Amino acid sequence: MTAITLKPDDLYTSCHPGDIPYAVTSDAVACGAVIPGQQRALDAIEFGVGMRRDNYHLYVAGSNGLGKHAVVNRLLKQLAADQETPPDWCYVNNPEGFYAPNAIELPAGMGVQLRQDMSRLIRDLSIAVPAAFESDEYRSRVQQIEDRSEEKKEHTLGELADRALGQGVLLTRTESGYKLSPTNSDQPMEADEFKQLRQVEQDRIEALIDALKQELKAVLLKIPAWAKEAMEKLRELNRSLASSTVDQYFPELLQKYAALPGVTAYLGSVHDDIIAKIEDFLPDESADPGIENRQQPASAELQRFEVNVLVDNSQLQGVPVIYEDNPTYNNLAGRIEHIAEYGTMITNFSLIKPGALHRANGGYLILDADKILNHDFAWELLKRALYAKEIRIETLEHALSLVNTISLEPQTIPLHIKLILVGSHSIYGLLKSHDPEFDELFKVMVDFAGDLIRDAASTQQFAALIADMVKQNDLLVVTRDAAARIIEYASREADDAEKLSLHLGCIKDLLMESDYWARGDKHQQISRRDVQQAIDARLYRCDQLREIMHEEILRNTVLIDTRGECAGQVNALTVIHSGDFSFGQPSRITATAHLGDGKVVDIEREVELGGPIHSKGVLILSSCLAHRYAQKQTLALGATLVFEQNYAEVEGDSASVAEFCALLSALAKLPIRQDLAVTGSMNQFGQVQAIGGVNQKIEGFYDICNTRGLTGAQGVIIPCANIKHLMLRQDVVDAVVQKKFHITAIDEVDEALELLTGLLAGELDKKDNYAQGSINALVVERLDELHKLHKQSSDDEHDE
């Protein structure tokens, strides 16, 4: 067993400027879109888009910042440009049912044309129809019909009046109607004069008047029928005139849209509707008595002839690629708006508004999985539309049967779409597990990688990516040295010297921030210094929490020793996350050992501050303890472990090596060096395993030691498996170069014990004994003492 003292070259893997294939990014050879490390995802997208079978929709998985949206959007737009543009969709009035508007499909660009043609048609008819109905010829024919009707009435009443007068009865017209009275020399007879007549004569006249009244009544009953007959003649005249006026405007339209049966059928219904309600084109003040008066202004009535262009693809080249960033129920399926009129909310087909499904119909729709799942009923709506292959515009209240009011029920529109759902791996797993319909609809998994193996080829690809980003975002050109520094930064973001982070959003932000600092210093290019300044400024903006917590250590509010020795006490290393920023700091672990029943108590777990992985680590070190020292006798040991001054949850097993060392130190009463910190997990056999955040942990302990003053003996112990992850800050590397700070890598927990105590760990000889004075020998001796004490205690209790 030999620990490895790391050299400066092990701590940071530089990118040699000679590996960058250009002096400045403007010299880079244009090679189209650069998407390094995502070939698997690109192949999956190509397959999913090319697969024209039903329900082969795509789920794009990956962590935030990988550029999933940008890559998907760019690829889809490239593919979309060569495809046939989908049709326009319009909603029009349904003469047979106001509440069920009809949908019309037209070739791309013709929806607006139809709306313009209909607007022109109604505008022309609004001029032509009143002009026709105000013409002298029309008025003359109307007058003829009315005169004939009046003549017929007057002639019939005149005949009755003459016949009555011949029999001595006068027919006169009064304000209240018609009156029959006896005459004397063609003058109405006075009542006194009538009474002077003989009774026989009075009876004769009264009988005659009664008979004439019946005849008059029969004539008066015919007058409404004659008026109705005249009205029918007027209506027939109106229809004939309307038809002759309107017909001349339709042949051109019918010829233009002859290849579109839906449009020609609509034009036919409009033609019939106009003729049937020609009065809608006449203003109230010019309406003829033969025309029914209207209650609404003409503009309101004529709205039914408008065309609501729901989807206009006139400006589209290829098929649409739509991203809906707020996928609510209404934003997906469309909505029906209302307007207030006389205190009442009303609606009509012109108030139907499209949703993302309409705009993307025939093309591609991109949605965020977390957003659609966070909006009530949006996910169910989407699945229903995909299954039914149609878009149904229905208010949420009616869909849930929450209201019973009448609303529009627009005709459904066929749905032909490729859906791309973008989200995390965790959401993908949840949908797979809890929604059986998800597998049936989303059959193509597009998995974006989070990092890329760092080699000569990938370095050149990444350099090309940097050049592409500079060009796309109109930034100052980047020098070779600056590009090399950005690649090194990508390795640090990946927490791996052998990989490059593919979180392109972070790289893009760094470029834009470097451009800011370069322009501020009046530079013409982005240099390595500008990149470093951007990195330093970014860290400074996020660094306040780290400064506060480190200040508490430096002021001895939080107790951390960086010099001296102490038994049962060790410096472990932790990582604290604050949003996207993370930093390391030392944490004191203490252990106590005493007579007991072999149980190691994890205080963090007992008070529910220890997470499950941390608790697992404590159980593993307990198992390792038993495996080493309890082969021949039971452990008569009781022990406790705790993170001192910790008031938050502890999670992870990266402190298990430190806890094991603290426990053996307490057991054997061996002092541990406080100028060293240790991190690493371990298995049941004492092998040290890799941990996360190794760079932050080393830098955290270094910062405390450096502020207090480096002694040349301080350092950090890490697993050998983490050497490949090291991308340390330059000041840490410089301290190692000057031998003021040390980083040592180990494979076995015994190596950590040797470094921390200065003693040999000791190995079993042929007689299963450890070398005298070794760490393991001291531990065994102490365990033997405890075992004897435990046995003696048990014997004493038995004697009692």
Image: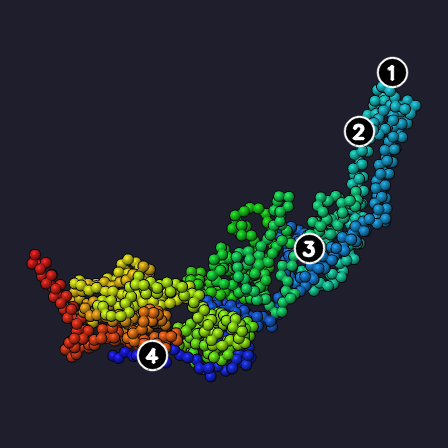
- Depth check: 279 or 283 in front? 283
- Depth check: 567 or 87 in front? 567
Secondary structure state at the residue bearing disc 2: loop
Circle 3 is placed at which residue position? 306
Q: Position of residue 548 (x, y in %)?
A: 37, 63
Q: Position of residue 157 (x, y in %)?
A: 85, 33
Circle 1 is placed at which residue position? 196
Secondary structure state at the residue bearing disc 1: loop
Which of the two labelled residues, at mark 1 and mark 2, occupies the earlier sequence position? 2
Query: Which marked residue is nearer to the observer: mark 4 or mark 1?
Result: 4
Q: Are marks 2 and 4 in contact (CB under 8 Å)?
A: no
Circle 4 is placed at which residue position? 738
Query: Which marked residue is nearer to the observer: mark 1 or mark 3?
Result: 3
Q: Is residue 798 left or right of residue 561?
A: left
Between the C-alphas of marks 1 and 2, the distance is 28 Å
Circle 2 is placed at which residue position? 176
